[in-house]
Image (cartoon, helix red, strand yellow):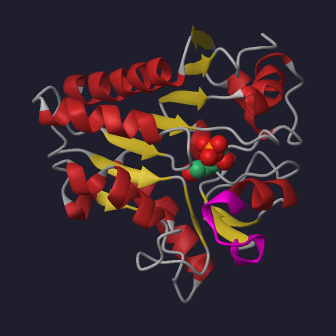
Amino acid sequence: MEIIKVKSYRELSFKAAQFVASQVILKPESILGLATGSTPEGMYAEIIKMYQNGIVDFEKVTSFNLDEYIGLGKESDQSYVYYMQEHLFNHINIALSNINMPNGLAKDIEKECLEYEERIAKSGGLDLQILGIGRNGHIGFNEPDLKFEARTHVVMLDEQTIEDNSRFFESIDQVPKMAISMGVKTIMHAKKIVLLASGAEKAESVYKMIYGKIIPELPASVLQLHPNVTVICDEAAARLL
Ligand code: F6R
């Protein structure tokens, strides 16, 4: 694991955007794995600036998002498909047909999971996967105690995740309890992984991810076994390192 400590969230966002841009510049038909949440918002803003300045072109890029709430679709401003449109897709030239998100409104969710995984495999696999990390050490929505072997699957969200994500909803009761998420195995097959962590509340899970035992109770710890992981953390998230 390569650990990059930066001073601020701004610097983290810029560094992360540089990783994405250099991936796409070196391989214009890259397959990108993308994340949502607060942490990558700044990175997406930087990527948009780079696109507008003609530094990077997304015409041939294909994207796969990590996860989506079950029951939410693009009409809902809390869905991840809505988030991605707002924060990135509406502002760059990625082809609509190259954007892949798990469909939280699919009638047959199990089938949706299988097909999503198949689409990733058929694309040739993820070249670069961007990750955040939960306070409980989750990656994607792979919550503590889930097996490392999982591919794209249905997850029950942890109490802590529901509480953490309630900030995006009017009340905690509105947070969906289930989601579709790429599995740990799907994530581990990515050729390169860049994990972003910002803020003091992530310091403990970041420490355990890097120095702790590799256990499903701390899903991100499995990244110690991946040959090409870069962790970018700001000062607060790197506090215990
Ligand atoms: C988002 C995702 C989650 C988040 C994590 C951190 O697609 O899969 O694992 O990366 O919950 O979220 P933030 O960045 O909001 O702290």
Residue in the foreground of this view, choosing between 67 and 85 = 85
**In the figure, is residue 121 to the left or right of 204?**
left
Q: Residue at x 52, y 29 (%)?
A: 193
Is residue 12 visible in the rendered image? The answer is: yes
Residue in the foreground of this view, choosing between 21 and 41 = 41
On the image, the x and y values in percent for residue 183 come to 65, 52
On the image, the x and y values in percent for residue 229 come to 57, 21
Q: Work out which quarter of the rendered image holds the C terminus and state it.
A: top right
Q: Work out which quarter of the rendered image holds the N terminus and state it.
A: top right
Q: Residue at x 78, y 38 (%)?
A: 137
Residue in the foreground of this view, choosing between 141 and 87 = 87
**In the figure, is residue 233 to the left or right of 57?**
right
Magenta-drawn stretch, dominant element (helix, strand or loop): helix
Is residue 127 visible in the rendered image? The answer is: no
Q: Which residues are magenta?
A: 166-175
Q: Residue at x 51, y 68 (%)?
A: 79
On the image, the x and y values in percent for residue 24 come to 25, 31
Q: How many marks?
A: 0
On the image, the x and y values in percent for residue 5 come to 59, 10
Q: Which residue is situated farthest in the bottom direction here?
A: 107
Residue 208 highlighted magenta (yes or no):
no
Residue 168 highlighted magenta (yes or no):
yes
Q: Residue at x 80, y 20 (%)?
A: 207
